[in-house]
Amino acid sequence: MVEGIEGRVAIVTGAGRGIGQGVALRLAREGANVVANDLDQGPLDETLRQIEEAGGTAVGLAASVTDADVGERLASLAVERFGGLHIVVTAAGFLWDGMIHRMTDEQFNAIVDVHLGGTFRVVRDAFKVMREHARQEKERGEAVPARHIVTISSLSGFGNLGQANYSAAKAGIAGLTRTVAIEGAMFNVLANSMAFGFIDTRMTRAMESQSEFVSGAPQGIPEAARNRALEVIPLKRAAAVEEAVGPIIFLCSDLSTYVTGALLEVNGGVHIS
């Protein structure tokens, strides 16, 4: 078992698919009580089924991270069902790509609201609970355990062709997370962000190999563009979901109690090529 996860309470958004699902399953396997969120009830139920069949403990909330009260609902569910809140991983999101001269306000705002706005809502209301619980522990003279917030940024946060909306949101998440790290330090709330490159999910697979849509927007990357991008990665491949989950679990555990405000790049070494 990974140190510092068993018995903790975790919120995971985007838990019906991809990285979010992988994180929810792994946290449950490590003994955490999981509050899983996804926009779609069907994929969310599948994640809950897998957790329960493996002997884990989880509860689900199907809701959009664009809902004004989603953060409060998730934090309240964690406390009411499991008595606390120690870990948050914000993995909800989708793509709606386009060159900037063709990008509409709707297209830009939709992606920014899901990725940056959704992260803000969930983190804000989770932070309120974490901060208050830490304050109470301090007043009782108890040791304050590390509580962990892990957000999902991206290699695209450094800029990427056809992703003005997604790049802006992911860069914003990195800044938001550093601010949470500063404000959370006195309460031992640690906030870190992951900058992922090519992880094998519906957002990075070739469009031609799948028929995945979110709100009418096709998911994936044109195969030719995807192949060109893979060529500049030193490892010459996309990562499996499990390879993305491992670093997140490290940042959710007591192996990382002196890590906060970090942006951890997990991209196959693309910045050294």
Image: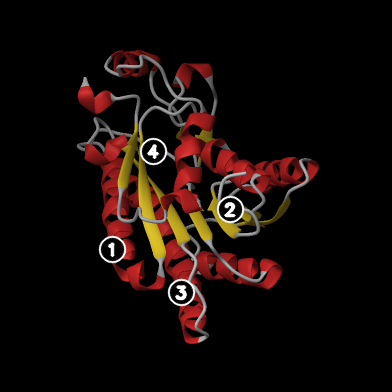
Structural distance between the alpha carbons of marks 3 and 1: 14 Å
Q: Which residue is mark 2?
A: 5
Q: Is residue 26 left or right of residue 248?
A: right
Q: Nearer the viewer, mark 1 or mark 4?
A: 1
Q: Which residue is mark 4?
A: 96
> Would you say residue 105 is visible in this rendering?
no
Please give the name of the residue rendered at 54% of the width and 36% of the height, measured from the top-left corner. 18
Q: Nearer the viewer, mark 2 or mark 3?
A: 2
Q: Which residue is mark 3?
A: 128
Structural distance between the alpha carbons of marks 3 and 4: 32 Å
Q: Of the two numbered discs 4 and 2 on the same chain, state the one appearing first in sequence.
A: 2
Give the quadrant of residue 184. bottom left
User: x%, y% of residue 102?
Assistant: 25, 36
Structural distance between the alpha carbons of marks 4 and 2: 35 Å
| Amino acid carrying mark 3 in the image | Lys
Q: Nearer the viewer, mark 4 or mark 2?
A: 2
Q: Of the two numbered discs 3 and 1 on the same chain, state the one appearing first in sequence.
A: 3
Name the element at disc 4.
loop
Please give the name of the residue rendered at 58% of the width and 38% of the height, measured from the top-left corner. 22
Q: Which residue is mark 1?
A: 179
| Amino acid carrying mark 4 in the image | Trp
User: x%, y% of residue 175?
Assistant: 26, 55
Q: Of the two numbered discs 2 and 1 on the same chain, state the one appearing first in sequence.
A: 2
Q: Nearer the viewer, residue 8 or 12?
A: 8
Please report contact status of discs 4 and 2: CB closer than 8 Å, yes or no. no
6 shown above or below 244: below
Structural distance between the alpha carbons of marks 2 and 1: 24 Å
Q: Nearer the viewer, residue 81 or 146?
A: 146
161 shown above or below 55: above
